[in-house]
Image (spheres, rainbow, N blue to C red):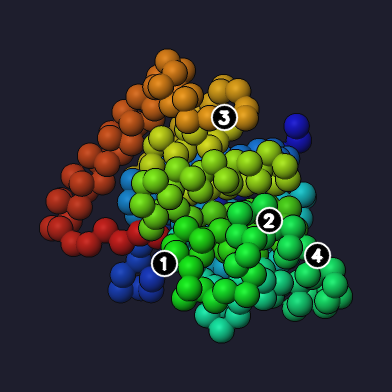
Amino acid sequence: MSAKLLVENVSKVFGGPDRRVTALENTDFSVAESEFITILGPSGCGKSTILKIIAGLEETSSGRVELDGREIHGPGKDRGMVFQSYTLFPWLTVAENIEFGLDVAGRPKEERRDIAAHYIAKIGLKGFEKAYPAQLSGGMKQRVAIARALANDPQVLLMDEPFGALDAQTRAVMQELLLSVWEESHKTILFVTHDVDEAVFMGDTVYVMTARPGRIKARIAVPLPRPRSYDIKVSDVFLGIKKEILGLIREESWKAANSLELMGGGRDEEV
């Protein structure tokens, strides 16, 4: 498959003359059409920064990002983003939150309702169309956030630890839900996570990043058949990939800890 998304020699430096932090340095990777990419790395390695750059919410300090051969210079409807926090409008109902982007785009009312109804059924929230975010559990809120992103029909879906705030049982349900939606839509997805099991279970390819400044340390293909069930987590192939990734991350985490100690401590902020 030809590359849909290209990240080429991207670096990102935050701060001014008095304090500069290099979050990313010479980061390169490509994502094929309909590929499900997961990204892992130590805290503060720039995982979230990569997604924000691709989303057009941050500018690169150097390098470039291209989608379908067009360089990205800002936000666009060809990219949708789901954050760890639910980012729903509390004054809108479930259906209205899902329809919001379609309304802004000027889509007809009946079309908006049909699209919202499709995703409400798909994410298992039929009957909650008129509920407000305050009346929903955390998992339900994140379902609405995912549905809202998908309703706008982006070419690429960017997900920044979308299940990080959920309990283990809800997280497992959400993983299977997202995979079922992906099996239907085959959107190109970039999914940032701290959870190695989640990265291997969800992804076609896992990118492991170095400690800050972040670069791609390893690209690991996941040759597990789809559709996937939780039983696959005890297979020899799954456990072998998990062991390899844990070794890579442990190595980078030690580097990050030693670097912080040499600098006299301090808080390693996520970027």
Whether residue 28 can be seen here: no
| Residue 65 in the figure: left or right of residue 215 | right
Most foreground residue, 10 or 128:
128
Amino acid of disc 2: Ala
Crowding at dot 1, Cα within 10 Å, few <14 / some 14-19 / many 20+, comes out as: few
Could you tell which of marks 3 and 1 lies nearer the N-terminus?
1
**Which of labels 3 and 1 is toward the front?**
3
Residue 61, image x and y in percent?
52, 62
In the rendered image, the residue lying farthest to the top is: 236
Most foreground residue, 152 or 141:
141
In the depicted structure, whether residue 87 falls above or below residue 61 = below
Could you tell which of marks 2 and 3 lies nearer the N-terminus?
2
Q: Identify the residue position indicated by label 2 in the image.
A: 121
In the depicted structure, whether residue 223 falls above or below residue 246 = above
- Whole-Å distance between the Cαs marked 1 and 2? 42 Å
Could you tell which of marks 2 and 4 lies nearer the N-terminus?
4
Residue 255, image x and y in percent?
25, 41
Report if the CB atoms under discs 3 and 4 are less than 8 Å apart.
no
> In terms of secondary structure, where does tag 2 sit?
helix
Most foreground residue, 199 or 39:
199
Q: Identify the residue position indicated by label 1 in the image.
A: 14
